[in-house]
Amino acid sequence: MSLAILIVAAGRGTRAGTERPKQWHPLAGARVIDHTLALFKDLPGLGPICVVHHPDDTDPLPDHVITAIGGATRDASVRAGLAALAPFIPSRVLVHDAARPCTPRSVILDVIAALDTYPAAAPALAVTDALWRADIDHETCLVRGVQDRSGLYRAQTPQGFRFSALVTAHANVLSPAADDVEIARAAGLDVAVVPGHEDNLKITHPADFARAERILRGSMDIRLGNGYDVHRFCDGTQVWLCGISVPHSHGLDGHSDADVGMHAITDAIYGAMAEGDIGRHFPPSDPQWKGAASHIFLRHAAELARNRGFAISNVDCTLVCERPKIGPHASAMQAALAAILDISADRVSVKATTSERLGFTGREEGIAALATATLVKP
């Protein structure tokens, strides 16, 4: 029985106070939507994942994610997602808010388990605070009464349904609904309530980002790796540094193209995963790597990180040399590394320093590089 995931991400989220809709806003080393997608990784029976987005949002999503254009209301967006998922013939579907990036896995699994018995299930928390009714039409908000909280719950997502039952329920919608539970109940479906979680917040206001970051940082796997490399000068007219050919009076000597900066960054990424160094993955004793372009090594390290569920949060590389001058080429190096790593350029730093004429770099015998890489797994 296949399980489909439908993530509603078409809202504008104006109350969040961000320049762009909150689901695309940075959060704890990635975007809100990236953390939300990671919630559903490796679920039993996982099938297609669909993100329903606004037509103005063209931000990239992982290749395995299918997309649909949302409607003017939430239920219209859900119907668009159901239509996109229908060709895959899933038996169940979880509908989740894109702005809920902190949902504990136990909540998701409880919703799925409840669908073995009920046609629909959703997480919720019992209301424990006193409830007031207030007059909000005056300049000063005044309490006008109290409300019995018995049997009241705070609804959360993901809300789970047997796929065909939700499609049928949506086909008979006559007016906009607050969520899919309301639509399911209008269609006569029983909806089981499973325990929600206080961490399963929906980012709504600016302060919610800080709270979500604290939750994610507490459960995230954050790795830091360092890399160091050095190559001596040899005869030549250029050096390869961080993916860019820089004219110089000498070349750099090495088994590959001797890109000292890219080698240091590659080793930093490997180091963050306790994967040794370039030599472990591309032995210099193997003749096929003679003169190889260093982007091969860096791309391999980046793909290995992604395959293990890590996002590359940032890399920082310092080149140590008297010459050539790095400043005029730093922006190009930054762009080249970002393209290879498949991250934004503002997550890549390339800078240079000298050793004040001390040591082998001070004597202009070669170039050294130091690098740091941060990997994050939600």
Image (cartoon, rainbow, N blue to C red):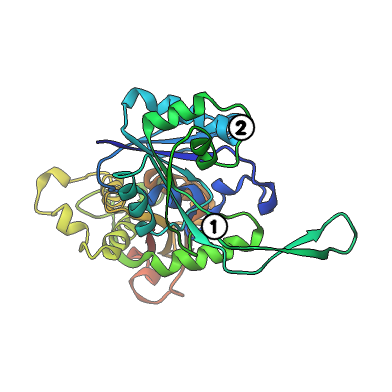
Is any atom of residue 246 visible in this view? no
Q: Quadrant of residue 47?
A: top left
Q: Amino acid at mark 2?
A: Asp
According to the picture, the residue beneath numbered tag 1 turns out to be 153
Q: Quadrant of residue 57?
A: top right
Is any atom of residue 276 visible in this view? yes
Q: Amino acid at mark 1?
A: Tyr
For mark 1, give the secondary structure: strand
Residue found 60% across the figure and 37% down from its top: 177
Residue found 60% across the figure and 61% down from its top: 208
In the displayed orientation, state which residue is furthest to the right: 139
Pointers 2 and 1 in contact (C-beta within 8 Å): no
Position above or below: 283 against 7: below
According to the picture, the residue beneath numbered tag 2 turns out to be 56
- Indicate the quadrant containing the C terminus: top left, top right, bottom left or bottom right: bottom left
Q: Earlier in the sequence, mark 2 or mark 1?
A: 2
Q: Position of residue 31 (x, y in %)?
A: 50, 51
Q: Nearer the viewer, residue 331 or 353?
A: 331
Q: Is residue 71 found left or right of 323 in the rendered image?
A: right
Q: Nearer the viewer, residue 360 or 283?
A: 283
Q: Position of residue 128 (x, y in %)?
A: 57, 68
Position above or below: 35 against 92: below
Position above or below: 2 against 336: above
Q: Position of residue 135 (x, y in %)?
A: 83, 58
- Indicate the quadrant containing the N terminus: top left, top right, bottom left or bottom right: top left
Residue found 58% across the figure and 33% down from its top: 54
For mark 2, give the secondary structure: loop
- The tag on residue 192 is none
Q: Nearer the viewer, residue 12 or 353?
A: 12
